[in-house]
Amino acid sequence: MTLRFGSVSSDLDLDARGRRAGQFGLTHSSDRHAFSTIRAPLGVIRGDDGPTALVCAGNHGDEYEGQIIVRRLFERLAPEDVSGRLILAPALNMPSVEAATRLSPLDGGNLNRSFPGLPFGGPTCEIAGFVATQLMPLADLAVDLHSGGTGTEYLDAAYLCLTGISARDAQTRGLALAMGLPFAMVVPPGDTPGDFDSAAHDAGCAMLSCESGGEGKVSRRALEAGWQGVLRVLADQGMLADGVAERMGATPAQQTRFLDLGAGAAHLTSDHHALAEPLVRIGQTVETGQPVTRLRDLHRLDAGVLDLIAPCDGVVAIRRSTGIVAPGDHLAVITPELDARSLDALLNQACAA
């Protein structure tokens, strides 16, 4: 059976037992691709009866750890290792992956703002629609792996994207704890319209995304943290036996600290054309008034320096990695830590809204 949405299609058999590699293809009439199909890899591993997980990366093309992790799953797992089915898409937005860019070079689209898609609405919307209508409805669990991209560095963190639906938010909280990354960032409902997370929830999937590493390179630390986290989630969902996950390198989950990426978070933003010197590292705990970034005027030696200070206590969750900045550029995000009571209150507030 062919899976199809607009001009995107795949003939890969996702139902039969075994491990198979295939592709989904996009047609797009441009100077370069007028007589071509733009192909992206798609794989499936099906073992005994059980749930289905859709594990994706390459939503943004300049984020690499997730792409490696999804390919590792296909390379290292055999059908007898899996209870249920893994659908693996390591390069969701192949035009962006090939160009090593966040946005598609074909239409300037951001795939993670293009769900649920639009048939024949352009390459990015069509890829989003193929994932939302042909892959997500098959899945009990969807996992979307991100890193900071070329311009930023992120904590190794799961994302608890709140929906305001109590049972769903509790489920995502449990998945974040199962992933066992050092941090989980709590995002308010509706924070990023058109994203993968909201489309997966609309399709009825349990959903977990994460951010780790960035700066347009592969961080060995972030890669291994993400790899172990994905194995732990699949084991928690009963798709991998604990022994299989351990054989693949999973270690016990560490305690996860929850951070407020909503109203409590503070952005440090430049008002100047400047050279930025970071004074803190990613993941560092800072106090109110502590210098976080030092700015030096880009054009004058005698202008002096300007220190941007933390407006609140918290953890440096996101840090800009480029040294030259302009007015409006965010340099860091400081996120307050949430204890169990504060986290419960935030979840209850989302449900009451």
Image (tube, helix red, strand yellow):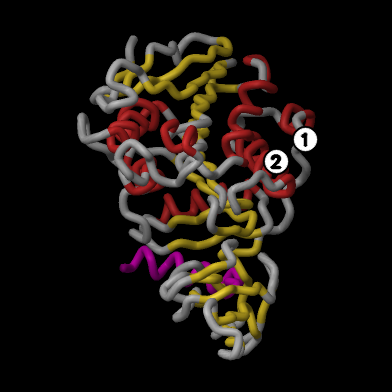
Q: Position of residue 9 (x, y in %)?
A: 33, 19
Indicate which disc residue 115 carries: none
Would residue 57 appear left or right of 202 to someone viewing this image?
right
Q: Position of residue 298 (x, y in %)?
A: 54, 77
Residue 66 to residue 185: above or below: above
Closer to us: 82 or 93: 93
Query: What residue is at 39 percent from the left and 70 percent from the top?
Result: 349
Would residue 263 appear left or right of 227 to someone viewing this image?
left
From the image, which quarter does the C terminus lie in?
A: bottom left
Q: Give the distance between the C-alpha atoms of the residues marked 2 and 1, in whole angstroms.
A: 7 Å
From the image, which quarter does the N terminus lie in?
A: top left
Q: What residue would you read off at disc 1?
A: 249
Q: What residue would you read off at disc 2?
A: 228
Q: Amino acid at mark 2?
A: Gln
Query: What residue is at 21 percent from the left and 35 percent from the top?
Result: 121
Residue 33: within the magenta?
Answer: no
Residue 338: within the magenta?
Answer: yes
Query: What residue is at 33 percent from the left and 36 percent from the top?
Result: 106
Q: Which residues are magenta?
A: 335-353
Residue 337 to residue 194: above or below: below
Closer to us: 71 or 240: 71
**Does the CB distance between marks 2 and 1 fall below 8 Å?**
yes
Element type at marker 1? loop
Element type at marker 2? helix
Query: What residue is at 55 percent from the left and 49 percent from the top?
Result: 210
Q: Quadrant of residue 154?
A: bottom right
Dominant secondary structure (helix, strand or loop) of the stretch shown in magenta = helix
Closer to us: 297 or 285: 297
Q: Quadrant of residue 297?
A: bottom right
Q: Amino acid at mark 1?
A: Gly
